[in-house]
Amino acid sequence: MKMKMTPPLRIALAVLLAGGVVAVGPAGPVTAARTASTAAEAAPLGKVLVFSKTAGFRHSSIPNGIAAIQQLGAANGFTVTATEDAATFTTANLAQYQAVVFLSTTGDVLNSAQQGAFEAYVAAGGGFVGVHAAADTEYDWQWYGGLVGAYFASHPATQQATVRAEDRANASTAHLPSTWTRTDEWYNYRANPRSAVKVLASLDESSYTGGSMGGDHPITWCHSYGGGRSWYTGLGHTEQSYTDPNFTRMLLGGIQVAAGAVAADCRPEPGYTPLFDGTQASLGQWRQAGPGGFTLTDGTLTSNGGMGLLWYPVRTFANYSLKVDWMMPGDDNGGVFIGFPDPQGDPWAPVAAGHEIQIDATDGDPTRTTGSVYSFQAPDQAARAAALKPPGSWNTYEIGVHGQRVEIWLNGVKINDYVSSRAIANGYIGLQNDGAGMDINYRNVRIKTDGPSEPPATDLARGRPITASSVEPGSVHAAGNAVDGNTTTRWGSAYADPQWITVDLGATYAINRVRLAWETAHARAYQVQVSPDNVTWSPVHATTTGDGGVDDLTVTGTGRYLRVYGTQRATQWGYSLWDLNVYGTAAGGTLLSRGRPVTTSSVEPGSTHVAGNAVDGNATTRWGSAYADPQWIAVDLGASRTLDRVRLTWEAAYARAYQIQVSPDNLTWTPVHTTTTGDGGVDDIAISATGRYLRVHGTQRALPAYGYSLWELEVHGS
């Protein structure tokens, strides 16, 4: 909001804000400055290595790809070295490159020493770009499989298909239309990488033949990995790809993202529900308060006039993570509003009762610039400067609201942390159109309740089985003290290096936050590691400059086990933790329920909301029941399965009380999850069960005037 007000309005707003404004210095405070992650300034992209060695099938498009990347370098100020000599993979040689492109490599292309050098390069912050058959490479090198994100499984004949751009804020996909029809060789992958990567684009399997990933088919993605950055696309088989401007621009963006030359939020996004997905149908659920409005073109909202507010009246939200992609063409203005009551048509009411997360990079008042809680708290300006992309580029906000606490991430970097005195814990959300000439665009508004990373999300480690390398001799400082929820008890180790403490979370989770409350005897150097089996460990955080206190870490990793592994003590004593807290969301195996036979107790009379809508993969169709209790929906998985996750995407008519049940025969049912406090939205639930049939059995509706209604019922397992 860039206010251009008459004096009475100015005075009224000053009175309104009196007593609530936080005094700020030139840089603007962050309430938890020590825990706010900051990004290094994006380094200019200077040198890129293109590696195209093949030990299997060789693509005829490799020379075209090399030429295209060289042309991109010439046009964008970086040099390109192309090689098929694996001997160039030494620590010293790789250090000169900001990114290494594996261009349709195949088979085993590096020996063990060269693999070690590449791992060290990535650990030091290097970037990896994988193109097409990079996923058909080094099957016996587990680290590399994690770096790419998924291994190749098969492909049908080269044919035309529709690509859906899922993230249109990333530099590699922001230029794409919402759907993109092109011809390529479409890879199927051995596992769906979605839980561990940020999916940027996916395939519409109904648009071609031979897709085998059950309708959820990522094809381009990015993620942080092992200290560096990874970007991969399955496109690029054909020679013609490398003269396609959409593809080459995507490739340029991928190189820039991997090199760290542009800001990008590559954190996975499990559990988010779209509020605006670019369709007219989803926009139809929103309402305009005040003057002006928005036009919709190719999935993008463009403001006109104002000052008004487009708000989502379907429901209020509490304890949530809200993500919004936005772009200002120039020196413009807008904002995201949170935590306000029904505005009753008045766009100024949310100013008085909620908060605006401002979008305006040039306002002279630091509390009224991009990333601020408008007029209340400025962002960390250094962190914002490192993360903010320039006018004309798409940016992403993540706004966490948990009770009175408001946290703001810009392109994945935390830039603000504020505790409000207003009643914002439960309210509506909205998008501002500030006024004529204050143009702004929005895309892809999505929300996840109870997360992703801040209290009151469930501490996954609380009371879980825990082991440690040692316990301080003669003490009562046992390992279990670190997960008992008691801040006055602690784990203490022997007085030696290294030492570790491991918690078994009981199921596989996508872990996004780890909180370590150290006693005086803290770690100077340690890693946080995750594992699927308590044997093979992958680091998700490492430091050699630990300073004790509370380390509140934003991480990205998937595993059942989490370990804190200390290698250097800060004192003469051992390692000592008051508390080890772990947060995340259920991360299951293969999606088993898509398109399977499904039955229900009833269907809403006179409606088209049949049972099959809940398993069709279409987020705009739903099952709706009769207006009575109880009701149920059951899916036949075709054979007995080992189940580890159920994801329920509720419509506004959700269940207050329900069970998830499994059965071997569709007759005898065993509950595996029970709640009486359902709050709608998305319930992403980790389970441990075996059965052929799974049923959601509702016993109390949240809206007595309606039935039960599910957009999607997703069952994962093996």
Image (cartoon, rainbow, N blue to C red):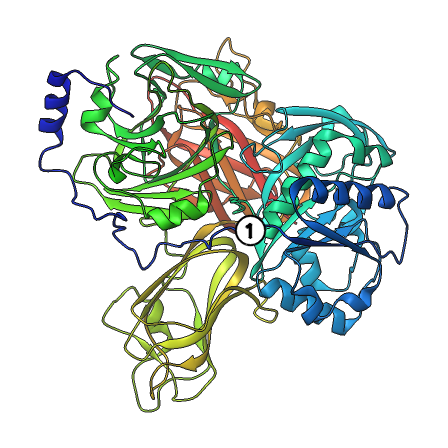
Residue 274: x %, y % from top left? 48, 29
The amino acid sitting under disc 1 is Ala
- Which quadrant of the figure contains the N terminus? top left
Question: Residue 15's image quarter?
Answer: top left
Q: Is residue 181 above or below residue 67?
A: above
Q: Residues within 10 Å of mark 1 (few under 14, many from 20)?
A: some
Q: Position of residue 605 (x, y in %)?
A: 48, 11
Looking at the image, which residue is at 68% across and 71% down?
92
**In terms of depth relative to the viewer, which is nearer, 18 or 252?**
252
Coordinates of residue 16 in the picture (x, y in percent):
12, 27
Q: Nearer the viewer, residue 91 or 464?
A: 91
* Residue at mark 1: 689
Place of residue 45 in the rendered image (x, y in percent of width and height, measured from the top left): 61, 50
| 107 sits to left or right of 263 | right
Label 1 sits on a secondary structure element that is strand
**How many labels were placed on the picture?**
1
Vertical position of residue 487 compared to residue 651: above or below: below
Is residue 154 in view from this perspective? Answer: no
Report whether 184 appears left or right of 424: right
Q: Is residue 381 above or below residue 362?
A: below
Residue at left 72%, top 49%?
Answer: 130
